[in-house]
Image: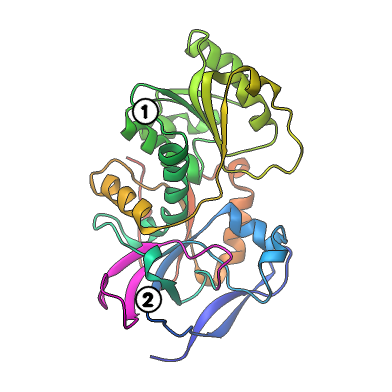
Amino acid sequence: MTDTMKAIVLAKFGGFDAFEMRDATVPVVGPRQVRVRVHATAINPLDYQIRRGDYADYVPLPAIIGHDVSGVVEEKGADVSEFDVGDEVYYTPKIFGGPGSYAEQHVADVDLVARKPHNINHLEAASLTLVGGTVWEALVTRAQLAVHETILIHGGAGGVGTVAIQLAKATGARVITTARRSNHELVRSLGSDEVIDHTADDYVSAVTELTHGQGVNVVFDTIGGDTLTRSALALADAGRLVSIVDIAQPQNLIEAWGKNAAYHFVFTRQNRGKLNALTNLIERGLIKPVIGAVLPLARVGEAHELLEGGSSRGLRGKVAIDVVGQTVELPTPR
């Protein structure tokens, strides 16, 4: 093994040109760590928020960022018994806890790492780690979504929304989604029972009509802002709202108080347990990633530009990064 690797380094906070390809030192493997040859990673909104400087206090520069890994174990620490060299794994690196996944190699605490599902490729697996763990935390752990309940998922065609629809459907819930008209066929194919075109219709009125005035048991907010504020109006009494978006401005949640609503704000904590639960659903064919674009590691800046301008350009699902130059075909939604 060489002690250096190619990595995309965030040299400054700013625009899409803030990244540089550099030679970086491969971290030493601790007793309870594994070194993984990264085959694929993916881009998340958290990535471009970090790049812009939104979390400057948490990310000393220069930095290797990135929050999804799918790859192969090449070295393991002395106290690692869970995995062997050659095992295929996937995981999210510890957020704000050291180097990320925009690199040829990554060293991770073994408790974060899970076996890659056998029925998907590395690009697909890397597209599921952060969003999958986030959706599991939001819908299962926090909202405790139950069979026969109704959920409203905002932004159903996005990287998080496409997984949320499938997990909610696997739970046995009735799924209502907001999406642009051009994405209705996609979200229905993933399991959405009803779709609201948020660009043409008021989703609160539409939910009232679809639920005969009852409202939904759960709202999953992937957008924030006004969407978060008005979502209380779509809730049933004692409903739950889970948001994965930080609140930049004060919110008036008086309607939520009137509904006896429970609000949950999720900045996900990753662990093997969530990923193993996700793997079970993936291997049963109940969850399949939607990948809208694949770019090589050297073009991470373009990948950020694509995701950040995403929905307005018709992007669906995730932007994945091919680190090893695999020849792949884009998966098609089932």
Q: In front: 83, or 87?
A: 83
Q: Which residue is mark 2?
A: 32
The residue stretch that appears in magenta: 71-98
Q: In front: 102, or 91?
A: 91
Taking the image as shown, residue 294 lies to the left or right of residue 284, namely right
Query: x and y percent of residue 78 in the render?
Result: 32, 83
SS state under label 1 = loop
Quarter of the figure with the C terminus: top left
Q: Which mark is residue 146?
A: 1
Q: Quadrant of residue 174?
A: top left
Query: x and y percent of residue 86 in the render?
Result: 26, 76
Main secondary structure of the magenta stretch: loop
Q: Quadrant of residue 53?
A: bottom right
Taking the image as shown, residue 328 lies to the left or right of residue 130, namely left
Residue at the (69%, 68%) spot, across then down: 17
Tell me if label 1 and label 2 are in contact, CB under 8 Å.
no
Residue extending furthest bottom? 2
> Which label sits in the foreground, 1 or 2?
2
Mark 2 Cα shell of 10 Å, populated few (<14), some (14-19), many (≥20): some
Residue at the (73%, 67%) spot, across then down: 13
Query: x and y percent of residue 145 in the render?
Result: 41, 31
Taking the image as shown, residue 20 lies to the left or right of residue 87, namely right
Number of marks present in the image shown: 2
SS state under label 2 = loop
Residue type at the position of mark 1: Ala
Query: x and y percent of residue 172 in the render?
Result: 32, 28
- In the rendered view, would you say 237 is above or below 114? above
Residue type at the position of mark 2: Arg
